[in-house]
Image (cartoon, grey):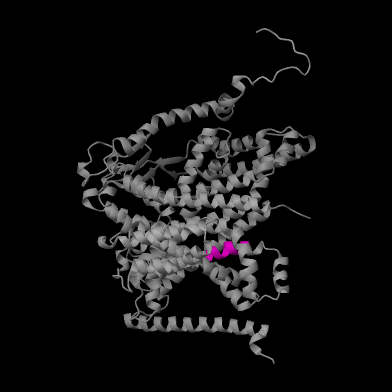
Amino acid sequence: MNKLQYKVGEHPNLPAPKTQGGIFKAIRNNLFSTWYDSIVTIILIYLLLSYLPMALDWLFFSADFFVDKRSQCTSGGACWGVITARFPQYLYGFYPPELYWRPNLASLLLLVALAPILYSKILYRKYFLMFSITYPLIAFWLLWGGFGLVPVESEKMGGLLLTLTLGVMGIALSLPIGILLALGRRSKMPAIRLFSTMFIELIRGVPMITLLFMATVLLPLFLPSDVIIDQLIRVIFIIVIFASAYMAEVIRGGLQSIRKGQYEASDVMGLSYWQSMSLIILPQALKISIPGIVNSFISLFKDTTLVIIVGMFDLLGVGRAALSNREWIGLANEVYMFIAIVFFVFCYLMSRYSLHLERRLSRSYK
Amino acid sequence: MFDISYNKKFRSIASQFTLVLFLVVVFYYFINNAIINLDRIGITSGFDFLFSRAGYDAYSPFFKFTSDSLHIDAYFVGLLNTLSVSILGIFIATILGFIMGVLRLSNNWLVSKLVYLVVEFKRNVPVLIWIIIWYFGVFLQLPSAKKAINIYDSIFISNRGLYFPSPVFIEGSIAILIAFIGAIIINFFYVKRAKKIHIKTGKQSPIFLVSLLIIIGLPVVTYFITNQPIEWVVPELKGFNFKGGMALKPEFVALLMGLAVYTSAHIAEIVRAGILSVPKGQIEAGMSFNITRNQMMKMVVIPQALRLIIPPLTSQYLNLMKNSSLAVAVGYMDLTATTGGITLNQTGQAIECILMIMGTYLLLSLLISAIMNYINKKVQLVER
C-alpha cells in the first residue's frame, strides 16, 4: 500500500474497511462476538441444518394431504388426511351443511364489526361502532336461528365455530361486566364494594374447571326441574363470569392510574357519577388498560378449550373425536399440531396487536 | 321543592339495599330449588358421605389408597397430588423460565431468535393442548414396557411411565444424614466467616463453590467411608410392567411437563421485561466500578429486576396451581378428579363436593399469595 500524505483537514472520507462494516460486522457482532458465542452458533446452525429439512419433509414434502383412510398414507410423512377428510367438521362441528352460509356470514360480519375497534381512522366510525355493539345479537340470531331462520340446536355447533363463538361472546359480554365490577370495587358504597370485591376474588381464586362443573352439575340443581337452560348458554355464562373478574382487575388498574384531579374536576363540572365516569374517567382508564384487556382476551380465548371437559366439541374436541375413529387411530401428532397451530395463529396475532397498541399508547403519552 | 330521590345519601342507601335484596332473593330462590331438587332425587345434604367407602382406585404415591378407603381419604389423595404437581411444576417452570428469559436477551442473534420462537409458540397455545400433547403425543407413544428405553439398566422409560431405582436405607445410613446436617452447620459458619473477611479486608472467597463442595462432598465421602449403606432397588420387568423402584406415572409427568412448559414461557417474558427495565445508567455505573459481568448481574441487575418480576410471577404461580386442575383431561387423580369427579358422580353430593374443592383452591391461592408477598417484601426497595 502506498502511503499518501494528506494535509490536516484534507483527508477524504474513506469507507470503513469491509470487515468493519455492513453485513460482515453484523454477522460478527451478532453471531461470533466471543469464542463461546461462535461455538453455540455453529452447534445451532448444525442442528438446524440437520433437523429442519427432516421436519419440513415430514410436514410437507413427503406428506399425504388428501386421503380417506390412514392405510392410504404411504409416503412416510405426515398424514394430513385426518384433517382434510373432515375439514368441515373442524370448522363447523355438526352444523347442518346446507346452513353453512350462516356461520360464514356471521364470521364475515365479525370482521366488519372488528374493523372500527381495530382501526381508529376508519370512515363513519360512529356508525360502524354501533354495528359492533349490536353484533353479538346478530351473531346469536344467525347461529342459533329463530325469528325466520331455521333454529339450530347448540349441540350441533362445534369445531372452530364453537371456539370462536365462545371467544367472541365471552369477550363482548365480559368487558361491560368487568367495567361494572371494577367501578363497584372502587365504589364508596360498602355493600356494593364488598360484593364486587368478594365476587372478583372468589372467581380469581378458583380454577375455571370448577366453575364449569358448577354450570353443568350445580346450576340444574339450583333451578326448578322444569327449567332447562341450553348447555352452550350455561358455558358462555360461566366463561363471561370468569373473564369479567379478570377484566375487572385490569380495568381497576387503569382506574387507579387516573389522577385525583380528574375526578375532582368532573365533580366541579356538576356531572353525576355516571356522567363523570362515562365522559371523563372511563375513556382515559380504558385507553390505558387496552393492552391488559387484549391480554385477558387472549387468555379467555385459550381457556375456551376447557369446554371439552364438560363434553363439548370445540376444535380440540373434534380433533380428539377424529383420533378415536378406527380409520384414523394413532395420528395424534398431526391432529394436535394442526390444532396448536390454529390457536397459535389467533393468539399470536392478538398479542402482536396488543404490542402495537402498547407502543402507540406509550408514544402518545410521551 | 324537596325531592328525596335527589338526595345523595338516600340514593346510596337505596341502591345498596336493592343489591342486597336482589342477592337475598336470588339465594333464597336457588336454595329453595336445591332443597326441592335434592328431595326429589333423594339425597340428604351434609358431609356424612365423606366417611363412606369410596370404592375406586386412585394413583397415590404418598399413602396407601385402596378401593376400601373412604371418600375423605380420596380427598387427601387428590389434595396431595395437586400439591405435588403444583410445587414441582412451579420449581421447574421457574428454572426454565429464568433460563429462557436470560437467553432471550442474548447477544447471539440466533439464540435470541430461536428462544423467541419457542417462547411465543409455548405461550400462544392453550395449556390444555400442551398437556394433551405431552400425554397422547409423547408419553403414550413411547415404546411398551417390554421394549422400554433402557438407560444403564437402571432408568426405564416406557408408556407405563418413568422408572428409577429407589434407595433402601439399611443400617448405618443414619451417618449420611448426620453428615449432611453437619455439612449445613459447617457451611453456615464458613459463609459467616467469609462475609466477615469480605467486609474487613475486601477479599472475596469463592462462597458458592466451597458451599457446594461441603454440602455435597461431606455426605458422599461419608457414604463411601461407612461402606455404602444405601442399597438401590432397580426396577425389573415382570409381566407387562415394571416392579420395584420408584415410578413416575405418565399422567403425572405429562401434566407436570405441560404446566411447566406453558408457564415457563410466561415467566420468560416476565424475566425479560424485568431485566430490560433496569435503567442503563445502573449498568454503566456498575461498569465504571470495574466489576465482572457475573458480578454485575448478581449485584446490580437482578436485585433491581426482581422488584418488577415478583408480582407478576406470583400470578403465574397461581395460574399454574389452578391449571393443575386440568389433570382430569389426562386422568391424573388430582383434587378435581377425585372429589370433584368420581366422588361427586358416585355420591351425587354435588353442592358439598364443589364447595370443598373451591374452598381448597381458594385456600391454596391464599397460601401462595401469602408466601410470595413475604418474598416480595424482602426484595422491594427499602425506603426511609
Quarter location, residue A96: bottom left
Magenta portion: prevailing SS class: helix
Residue at the limit of the structure toward the top, as seen here: A2
> Which residue is at a point 57% across and 28% down the rendered structure image?
A26
Image spot of residue B94 (x, y percent) = 54, 47
Report the residue that reaches farthest toward the front: A123
Quadrant of the rendered structure where residue A218 is? bottom left
Where is the C terminus of chain B found, in terms of image quarters?
bottom right
Does B225 sit above or below residue B134?
above
Q: Nearer the viewer, residue B11 or B226?
A: B11
The residue nearer to you, when weighing B330 against B162, is B330
Residue A169: give x, y in percent of width and height: 43, 65
Going by the image, does A321 lie left or right of B216?
Answer: left
Q: Is residue A79 above or below residue B353?
A: above
Residue B179 in sight from this viewpoint: yes
Seen in the picture, residue B293 relative to A359 is either above or below; the reply is above
Q: Quadrant of the N terminus of chain B?
A: bottom right
Whether residue A264 sits left or right of residue B96 in the image: it is: right
Q: Is residue B361 visible?
A: no
Residue B321 percent coordinates (x, y): 49, 57
Q: Which residues are magenta?
A: A245-254
**Number of callouts:** 0
